Amino acid sequence: MQYLHLLCYQEPPSQNKQLCLVFHEMQQQPPSSHQHHHQEQPQFLGHTGGIGTGAGAGTGFGFGVGGAGSEGSSGGAGTHHNDGGLRELLVECAASVTSSDWHRAIRCLVHLSRAASPHGDAVERLAFYFSAALARCLCSLSTPCASEIRSLLRLNNLHFLLEEDQPPPSFEDDLFYYSGGAEEAYLALNQVTPFIRFSHLSANQAILEAVDNERAVHIVDLGIMQGLQWPPLMQALVERRRLKQLEEEGQQQQQQQPPPSSPSSLEHEEQSSEVGRQAHGEEPPTLSSSSSSSSTTLTLRITGTGPSISLLEQTGARLRDFARTLHLDFEFDAVCTTSRHVVASLQQHLELRRGEALVVNCMTQLHKLLPAAHRAALPHALEFMRSLCPRILTVAEKESEHDLSQSFLERFLVTLDHYVAVFDSLEATLPPRSPQRLMIERLVLAKEISGIVLEDGGGDDENLAVVRHQSFGNWRRDMEAAGFQLVPPSDFAIAQAKLLLRLHYPADGYRLLVENQHGSLFLSWHDKPLVALSTWSC
């Protein structure tokens, strides 16, 4: 695995020599024409009848980013689609699930399967994965009709929506079944979209500013995965320490220079003694090697959590190898745990040391505590983090709202609105037949969509885990209730986030929104915020 490097810029003295964490690599791929591959048209063999006009159907819904109920493409989205009624079908299916009209829901899925495709444009691909999510939701419901629903799906040749390992009918393009797993898909997402890099870059800059002048730093990273975030920060910390060392040495040399006036007899004697020491190879007392070493030593320790001990060990080994190339004193501690049990695991295994500046990093992890079955775990987790008294806490989450009071249809519309913008951004970034895009959508985005569409209480299987998100306004409420205070981003952090988007993601549409009132950074596709990054202190 190859880590990304940085361009470390030294700002003028007035800028306090801040370092810019901008990546070297730039990925630009030329667009290509769309190629559509539609599936066979299965015939509905269960309940007969036409598509009804349930809630939200037949009202001219477009796939615009502007929100449910807008006609055509709105809200500033750059790509306009003729959705051919796919949104109406999706909304009709969701409304049928809300009203427990299973036969109507399956009729909608039959019609969707005729037009939705993982190889079409953004609308067709989105409809394909939302259809699969609705099918899985139907089968996960705790209802006496669950077995009948599954039988109807199979009877109507829709079982491919439930079984990812089985190809859909008449589908011959094995690009869709890319051999890469979830780890490769995550790396591809990091490479071709700014969502992960933006979060890592902005969080790293906040950490770098928070631990200025610290010689021992301890980062607790919840859900570290491959550890992609840390090599840039490690390099920046080492570079900043080197610059401070050069500055200290320059100050010491200035202090040793004789004054311009004539030296006294005592100064003559001291200078003679100094010459004598140098002649015998002795070091001056003010520049002893032990003193210099202690003032420039930098130690970094990372405690990473995750559900796979093998992945944690691989991540730790890679980070240690990278630290060796920088001559950085580095330690890695692995805590194998799930996000729902992370507090209990850290209480048992986390080692805190006197003199370390503690940082807690939560990149898209806290939302895993939002589902109704685990909602009580979120205040407990925040209180535990507050008890650690970290120098800074960094939080990145998707900007969406799945309130517990929402109906299934309301949550579905909010989710659809969010992923319209995500798929639209991929449409503008990657060619339609790109294996990277197919892998990202199938192994990352499709799983997210399925988790959000699932009802609370459904999906005992880890692959169908319920997923919920909330807006930054609600995150701020929860963080402040736990005793945290919001730290606004620095002007430098804002400038370099804009630079990241301009240099590495030139597709027209990615924007940085700064909420002065909230003090948070938002990465948006046009005017639709998709990711929120915030930093907090005790």
Image (cartoon, helix red, strand yellow):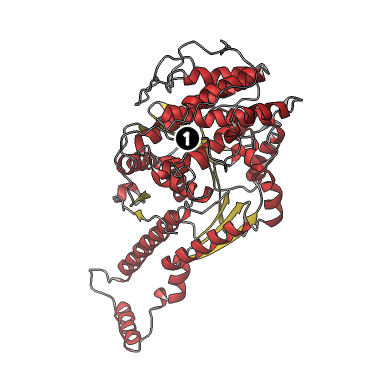
Local crowd size for mark 1, using a 10 Å CA cut-off: few (<14), some (14–19), many (≥20): many
Q: Is residue 112 above or below residue 328?
A: above
**Where is residue 282 shown, x and y percent of the image?**
38, 85
Q: Nearer the viewer, residue 398 or 271?
A: 398
Q: Which quadrant of the figure contains the N terminus?
A: bottom left
Residue 505 placement, left or right of 523:
left
**Where is residue 412 shown, x and y percent of the image?**
57, 24
Q: Quadrant of residue 152?
A: top right
Q: Nearer the viewer, residue 366 or 36?
A: 36
Q: Is residue 259 above or below residue 97?
A: below
Q: Which quadrant of the figure contains the C terminus?
A: top right
Q: Nearer the viewer, residue 324 or 181?
A: 181
Q: Quadrant of residue 526?
A: top left
Residue in the picture at 35% in, 43% down:
500
- Secondary structure state at the residue bearing disc 1: strand
Residue in the picture at 40% in, 56% down:
236
**Where is residue 87 shown, x and y percent of the image?**
49, 20
**Where is residue 86 shown, x and y percent of the image?**
48, 21
From the image, tell me which residue sits under label 1.
531
Report the amino acid beneath label 1: Val
Residue 241 placement, left or right of 305:
left
Using the rendered image of the protein, determine whether residue 285 is visible from the camera's viewpoint. Answer: yes
Residue that sits furthest to the right in the current view? 144
Residue in the picture at 70% in, 36% down:
374
Q: Nearer the viewer, residue 47 or 517?
A: 47
